[in-house]
Image: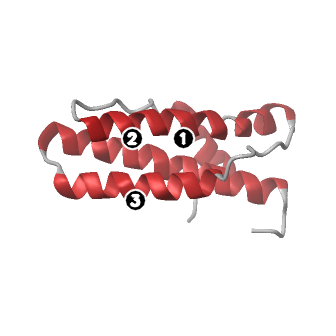
Amino acid sequence: MALTFMDSYTLWRRMPFPSGGPTEDLKMTYADLAEVDEYVTTVIRFVERGIFKPSPADVLSILDELMERIDRLCEESSGKDLEVARAQYAYAALMALVYRQFLAAANPGKS
């Protein structure tokens, strides 16, 4: 059974924002994650008020690139750094799912 848009949205809204890490790479992915999180917040307006206004940024491409970078960090990391990288990856992946479902929910038949 796949997560519905509202399931994914609810998980995203309740999921704590992941921390940054001590390394420069984890600090950068943290900053990039925070920036793309801002773009994804447009989904909140859709859920709460029915206003469909996607971000002008290519959110899904940004998230794909960010997840690739974080995935590489996971391969290179261990201990606490690996834990941080995995949490960042999980948050990014959930945002990608929410945003993809947002676009499909607002434009039925165009997924």
Which residue does the numbered mark 1 point to in the structure image?
Answer: 11
Marks 2 and 3, how far apart in space? Answer: 11 Å
The residue that appears at 51% across and 49% down in the rendered structure is 94
Q: Position of residue 3 (x, y in %)?
A: 59, 57
Which comes before the other along the chain, label 1 or label 3? 1
Q: Give the residue at x 83% y 53%.
A: 106
> Is 53 above or below relative to 2?
above
**Which image quarter is the N terminus in?**
bottom right
- Check the image and name the residue furthest to the left: 79
In this rendering, the answer to whether 58 lies above or below 49 is: below
Q: Amino acid at mark 1?
A: Leu
From this view, report whether residue 84 is shown above or below residue 65: above
Mark 1 residue crowding within 10 angstroms, few (<14) / some (14–19) / many (20+): some
Q: Which mark is residue 68?
A: 3
**In front of the other: 14 or 46:** 46
The x, y position of residue 53, in whole percent, is: 83, 42
Q: Which mark is residue 107?
A: none
The amino acid pointed to by label 3 is Glu
Residue designated by label 2: 29
Please state which of the two labelled residues, at mark 1 or mark 3, is closer to the viewer: 3
Dot 2 alpha-carbon crowd within 10 angstroms: few under 14, some 14 to 19, many 20 or more: many
Q: Secondary structure at mark 1?
A: helix
